[in-house]
Image (tube, helix red, strand yellow):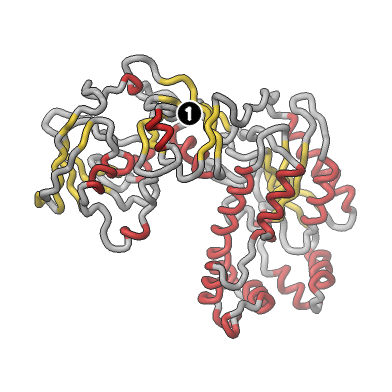
Amino acid sequence: MLYNILLLLLLLLSPPALPLSLPTSVASPFPLVVGVTGPIGSGKSSLCSSLASSLNGTSLPNLPPLVTAHIEADKLASYPPGSPLHASICDAFPSCAPGGVLDRSLLSDLAFADPPSLSRLNALVWPAVTSQLRSLLSDLPRSPPHLVLLEAAPLVPAGWADGPTPLCSSLISVTAPPPVRAARVASRNSLPLPAAELRVAAQSDADFGLDRAGAIRVENSADLPAAVAAASAAVLGVLQSLPAQPPAIPRGGAAGISLEKPLGLLLEERDDGGPGAVVAGVAEEGSAVPLFESGEIRAGQALGTVAGVDVSGMGFDDVMDVLIGAGSPLEIAFADAEEEGETEEGEGEEGLPQGTPVSVTVTKGGAPLDLGVTAAVGDVLLKRLKEAKAPVYTGMAKMTNCGGMGQCLTCKVVLTEPDGQTLYERSEYEDAKLAKFPSNVRLACMTLVEGNVRVDLP
């Protein structure tokens, strides 16, 4: 409920912007996001609230007036009784869950007193909060410019400030002397001062980016207006270094298609080695399947924008990260289809037209299976194998597979082609997913039939 209310407020108050790019990373698929972190009692919540008010409506030569919002990640870390996360935490910390109901006070005392317990708790909570944050940021509109102040104590150790697609692009680390922080904690939480001092001492500066190169360090001991002014000047300096913002890409319209997840799109790298991703086909299920069958989406079309983010110049893996991180439904606009003679012409790599029947022999552990697989050029291999009742999934994978979305790796197959043919080459995405496996191992859900082949099931 809290997540839905926060999302509604943000959508009403603040359409955001194009992503902020850092020289050391690819463009984030999210709006302009500044992470704000700091140890307990540093006053980061007060600073964020005042900073959001200070920056709201600010105009810069390179950006239209900003709209700001303050997201408190800690408030997304809710685990009400009956939720899967609540059950997991109760199982991990039975002493903090008398009668099967979590006592947050006991859990908090244990986590701050025992670093291993804190690490176990974080390992349960952080992935859930990360998923909510990615969905929240991705679902925001894309224009006008929107500045999100993402307040999170675990921002650095949770990895939200790093990686190819980080949640935030700049980092503010708020600090104050330990005695000041302990006094604030004691007053706020109605704790004895010694107990507050223990909580302060349990945290490390490294977890809050205080020793991190490039972090904006803000002292917040007593003069909050001075701290806000320092943080505001630093953030505006970062924003002023951005290139002038181009016009926002319209959401919807003739050039855009709104799709619910799962999409069911099969994508591949460009044949010419250029950036971006092109449509190779569709999986068994997904919102894109009927549009592909009607011709509204076609093989060979390149992705232009995803949720307002221009992906045409990104590497294939980065495009996949944007798609995975985007919310649902999402807008996809396609660039011009590939030039004549490539996939749009409806031919496989060996020149066979789409729909040409081919031979697919299936074995399991090397032993032939009499399945009578019927397949043609352009078919999704997994779809044809499942139609023939081939035992692609075994054990728990029958229930836990990703439904042909290229995520779970449970549809791995080994392909053997006739001598002299090399039609079934892995995409860059599959290479990353299957890095530990030989090159003839493919994901059946991401393999289009292109010619005669033998399929060996594990």
Task: Report x, y in % for residue 193.
Answer: 81, 76
Task: Report x, y in % for residue 136.
Answer: 63, 48
Pointer 1 local density, CA inside 10 Å: few below 14, some 14–19, many at least 20: many
Quarter of the image that includes the N terminus: bottom right
Task: State whether residue 120 appears in this view.
Answer: yes
Task: Report x, y in % for residue 353.
Answer: 24, 23
- The quarter of the picture where residue 345 lies is top left
Residue lying at 72% horizontally and 46% vertically, measured from the top left: 10
Residue lying at 78% horizontally and 49% vertically, measured from the top left: 218
- The quarter of the picture where residue 338 lies is top left
Q: Work out whether residue 406 or residue 181 is closer to the camera in this orientation and state it.
A: 406
Task: State whether residue 205 appears in this view.
Answer: no
Residue lying at 77% horizontally and 55% vertically, measured from the top left: 44
The kind of residue on which mark 1 rests is Leu
Task: Report x, y in % for residue 159.
Answer: 57, 51
Q: Is 88 on the left-hand or right-hand side of 156?
A: left
Q: Is residue 151 above or below residue 305?
A: below
Q: Which residue is mark 1?
A: 303
Q: Is residue 41 above or below residue 166?
A: below
Residue lying at 36% horizontally and 45% vertically, measured from the top left: 433
